[in-house]
Structures are given as structure tokens and as C-alpha cells.
Image (spheres, coloured by chain):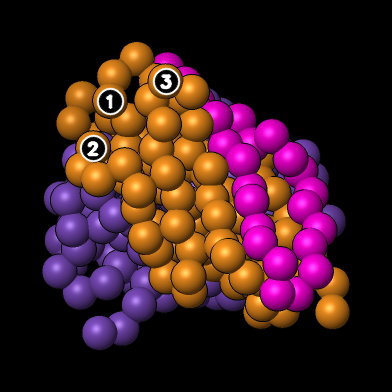
Amino acid sequence: AQSVTQLDSHVSVSEGTPVLLRCNYSSSYSPSLFWYVQHPNKGLQLLLKYTSAATLVKGINGFEAEFKKSETSFHLTKPSAHMSDAAEYFCVVSDEIQGAQKLVFGQGTRLTINP
Amino acid sequence: KAGVTQTPRYLIKTRGQQVTLSCSPISGHRSVSWYQQTPGQGLQFLFEYFSETQRNKGNFPGRFSGRQFSNSRSEMNVSTLELGDSALYLCASSWTSGRASEQFFGPGTRLTVL
């Protein structure tokens, strides 16, 4: 079974400094990986996805993630944090059972931005 | 293009009652998945429908059921509600159902069971 582990439940950074949200995955085959963001009282929005193309994936709002097979990691980064980035972030691996997709979510990382 | 819509947005029920939640996918999307989000268990997969067929089911009791109509709209039903069913229920739609499919989420239905 596929799984993801988000290494930090809470990350706090100052506005304008880099953001790093860590995610390790476990997969028996080449995984499809996603990062989603959830703002308070909102649904989930896709930031970016990796599906075995380029290992460095660029997403929306200046976020990017690098797939590292040797480290089984898919960390999310952003060079400069903005106040609007404060939200919950989920690392997700896609599993497929009999042709049907099932998303497996990490426990989430709450990102706080300090002014 | 309109996004995924879910109705109602908020719902309050009492133990033992049943509830039906509705999800309208993005136009043209044929796959609809449901997820439950709670502070303790996080986001958990409930089930997935594609062309009116349930193709995948998570580890939830039989009180949780769903269906999909020919226009791809989906409903989820929970019978004999328990306090632990209080959660945010999220619906997601996608064009196909493969492993690399991108799922688009609705805003969710917040269910409170008293």
C-alpha cells in the first residue's frame, strides 16, 4: 500500500524567508505524488503534481517540489513566504486499485507566517 | 468552467438520524470521490464512482453509502448517525480515474452530529 509521512505537523517562518515542508513517501511502484493546500474553511486546492516526468515540479503561487527517488522524498519549497501562504498543506500519494484512483493523504503541515 | 459544488455547506443532525450529501462535479468529469476529514483521523478516502459504478471503497462501515447518477452527480448517505461522524465531507471530481488523475475538490459539507 502507498503511504506518505509529513515530517512536521507545524512549520513557522517569517514573511519573506524560504519555506520547506517535508514529505516522505512509500510506494511499491513509481508513484504519482501531489501537494494540496487547504485554507481555513475551504476545500483543497492542487499546488502541483509529479507523475514520473521531470523530477523538479513547479506549481502555483511560486511553490515547487523535487522528487528524489533515492531518498523517497517529495519536499515542498518556496523561496519567499507571503502572508497569504498561511494554510494547511497536504502531501498526497495516488494509489490505484483495479483501475480506480484513491488518494492517500499525509497528516498535514500547518504553515504559519510571521510578519 | 464552474468548479465542484457541494450542498448543503453546513448540516446539523442528531444521533440516529440519516443524512444525504450532494456533489456536482465539474462539467465533463466522470469520476467522483468522497473523503472524510476529521481532526483526529485526517483525510480518509470513502469511495469513488465512475460512470455510475462504485469502483473503490475505503475502510468505513456499511452505514456509509453512495451513488452516482447518469449526469455524474453523486450523493453520499450516512444512516444511523453517530457522534463520531461529525466531520467535513469533501467531494472531488476528475476527468478519468487513473493513478495520475488530477482531482478537483469542492468546498465540503460540514456535518455536525449532536
Q: Is residue B82 left or right of residue B18?
A: right
Quadrant where the image shows the C terminus of chain A? bottom right
Q: Name the residue: 25% across, 84% down.
A: B1
Depth check: give the residue in front, A81 or A38: A81
Q: Is residue A107 visible?
A: yes
Tag 1, which secondary structure?
Answer: loop
| The one of A47 and B104 positioned closer to us in this rendering | A47
Going by the numbered disc 3, the residue's amino acid type is Ser
Label 2 vs label 3: CA separation?
14 Å
Residue behind mark 2: A52
CA gap between label 3 and label 1 equals 12 Å
Residue B22, by quadrant, is bottom left
Query: Does residue B69 appear in the picture of this structure?
Result: no
Q: Nearer the viewer, mark 2 or mark 3?
A: 3
- Residue A31 image offset from top left, x and y in percent: 32, 30
Dot 1 or dot 2, earlier in sequence: 1
- Which colour denotes chain A? orange
Which x, y percent locates residue A81?
Answer: 66, 71
Is A14 one of the magenta-colored residues?
A: yes
The answer to which of marks 3 and 1 sits earlier in the sequence is 1
Expressed as whole percent of the image width and height from the top left, the position of residue B113 reads 77, 55
Compared with residue B49, is residue B99 higher up or lower down, i.e. above or below?
Answer: above
Range covered by the magenta-colored residues: A1-26
* Residue A32 colored in magenta in the image: no
Tell me the residue that label 1 is attached to. Answer: A30
**Residue A10: image location, x then y, percent:** 79, 49
Report the side of B52 relative to A102 (left or right). left
Residue carrying label 3: A70
Chain shown purple: that is B
